[in-house]
Amino acid sequence: MQLLQQDASLSAREIAEQVGLTATPCWRRIQNLEKSGVITGQVALVDPAAVNLGVTALVQIRTNNHTAEWLSQFQAAIDTFPEVVEAYRTSGEIDYILRVMVPSIDSYDLLYKRLIKAVDLYDVRTVFVMEKIKQTTALPLDYV
């Protein structure tokens, strides 16, 4: 799995060579990982700067309304924003954190105005990422 997390374009033969198997059993193992839901998909990773998404914002949201109806409205609202690339319900003082990618601060401001119009929020605070220190899509597999 580690090799696939690093490069999903590797063929079963290439992976097999690196792990000491023949291609057929390696291919079967990969198929089993997909069928069992361990491998959930394969994607191409795009450089944000190459598609004019140079600003990353971490949006911290608090709400006074914790009903299922509000949550459903919130989820529906953020689903309409392609700029929201991740959304988490969190513990502690912050209820939700969104990772937003936009071309500029002005673009973020427009998104912010659309968001607060779409759903009732108690408090919104935004932290702009100045520098990416680490980012990976590979999960640690030491716990399997």
Image (spheres, helix red, strand yellow):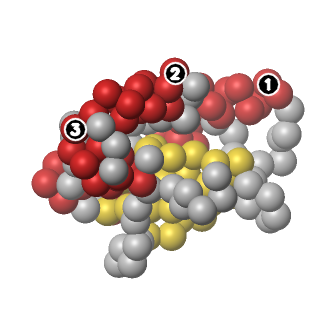
The secondary structure type at the circle numbered 2 is helix
Residue tagged 1: 69
Q: In the image, residue 129 lies at what x, y percent?
A: 41, 72
Q: Is residue 97 above or below residue 127?
A: above
Q: Alpha-carbon distance for marks 2 and 3?
A: 20 Å
User: Which label lies toward us, 2 or 3?
Assistant: 3
Residue tagged 3: 13
User: Which label lies toward us, 1 or 2?
Assistant: 2
Q: In the image, residue 137 lies at what x, y percent?
A: 42, 54
User: Which label lies toward us, 1 or 3?
Assistant: 3
Give the residue at x 56% y 28%.
37
- Residue type indicated by callout 1: Glu
- Residue type indicated by callout 2: Lys
- Residue type indicated by callout 3: Arg
Give the residue at x 54% y 61%.
140
Left or right: residue 123 compared with residue 27: right
Q: Is residue 112 above or below residue 55?
A: above
Front in this rendered view, residue 14 or 39: 14
Residue tagged 2: 35
Labelled pair 1, 2 in contact (Cβ < 8 Å): no
